[in-house]
Every structure is written in structure tokens, then in C-alpha cells.
């Protein structure tokens, strides 16, 4: 089975920062849509979609903040590489 995987350089701290930047970009897009789009229905649909995407990313980012404690990091179902110190700690805990 072919599965999507994140690149090795995209580890947990980097992914948290990327998610934060993406949420900021979505907030700016939502503001621009609300300001520039004239049709109310189109404006409402686009703002709801952008806010929904931001909420989904925020939820995943929160999970990334706590995933090192349970040694299982995933971002939208894809495994995320832990930083070396967290991976070493998980290896010690799992071998006891």
C-alpha cells in the first residue's frame, strides 16, 4: 500500500512553526476574502472554508505540542519525526 510520508527534515518543531505560519496566512486570506468579495454567499462560503482549515491545522498543531510525551507524533495521519532528544527519551522509556 502506498502511503504519504513527510520528508525527514520536516520534524516536530519545524512542523509546528509551519502550521503556525499557515494559520496566520489563512487568517489573512479570510480577512481579504471578507473585504474584497462582494457576493455575500460566496464570501460566507470562502470565510467558513478558511476558518475551518485554520481550525483543523490548529487542532493538529496542539497535538504536535503534546505528542513527544506519548512518543507518537502524527500530523493529519502522517508520521512526524521527533527531535533527537525526544526520540532518545522515547527509546529509553520503551525499552524499560
Image: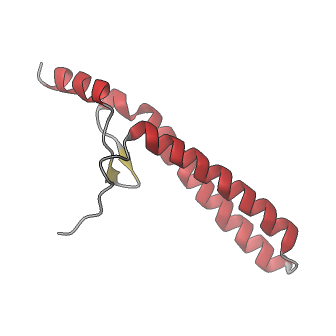
- Residue furthest toward the left? 95
From the viewer's perspective, is residue 68 above or below residue 50?
Answer: above
Q: Residue at x 48, y 47 (%)?
A: 60
Percent position of residue 57, x then y: 54, 52
From the viewer's perspective, is residue 13 above or below residue 10?
Answer: above
- The total number of labels drawn is 0
From the viewer's perspective, is residue 4 above or below residue 63?
Answer: below
- Looking at the figure, which quarter contains the C terminus? top left
Q: Residue at x 35, y 27 (%)?
A: 69
The image quarter containing residue 88 is top left
Q: Is residue 91 found left or right of 13 in the rendered image?
A: left
Toward the viewer: 16 or 63? 16
Toward the viewer: 50 or 11? 11
From the viewer's perspective, is residue 34 above or below residue 26?
Answer: below
Q: Is residue 14 found left or right of 9 in the rendered image?
A: right
Percent position of residue 68, x then y: 35, 30
Percent position of residue 1, x then y: 17, 69
- Residue furthest toward the front? 9
Percent position of residue 58, x then y: 57, 47
Q: Residue at x 78, y 68 (%)?
A: 33
Toward the viewer: 7 or 16? 7
Q: Residue at x 29, y 58 (%)?
A: 5
Name the colouring of the figure: secondary structure
Q: Is residue 18 found left or right of 73 in the rendered image?
A: right
Q: Is residue 7 found left or right of 46 in the rendered image?
A: left
Amino acid at each position: 500500500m502506498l502511503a504519504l510520508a513527510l520528508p525527514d527534515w520536516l520534524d516536530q518543531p519545524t512542523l509546528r512553526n509551519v502550521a503556525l505560519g499557515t494559520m496566520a496566512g489563512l487568517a489573512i486570506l479570510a480577512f481579504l476574502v471578507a473585504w474584497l468579495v462582494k457576493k455575500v454567499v460566496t464570501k460566507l462560503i470562502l470565510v467558513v472554508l478558511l476558518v475551518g482549515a485554520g481550525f483543523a491545522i490548529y487542532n493538529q498543531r496542539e497535538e504536535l505540542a503534546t505528542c513527544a510525551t506519548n512518543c507518537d507524533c502524527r500530523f493529519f495521519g502522517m508520521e512526524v519525526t521527533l527531535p533527537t532528544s525526544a526520540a532518545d527519551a522515547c527509546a529509553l522509556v520503551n525499552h524499560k
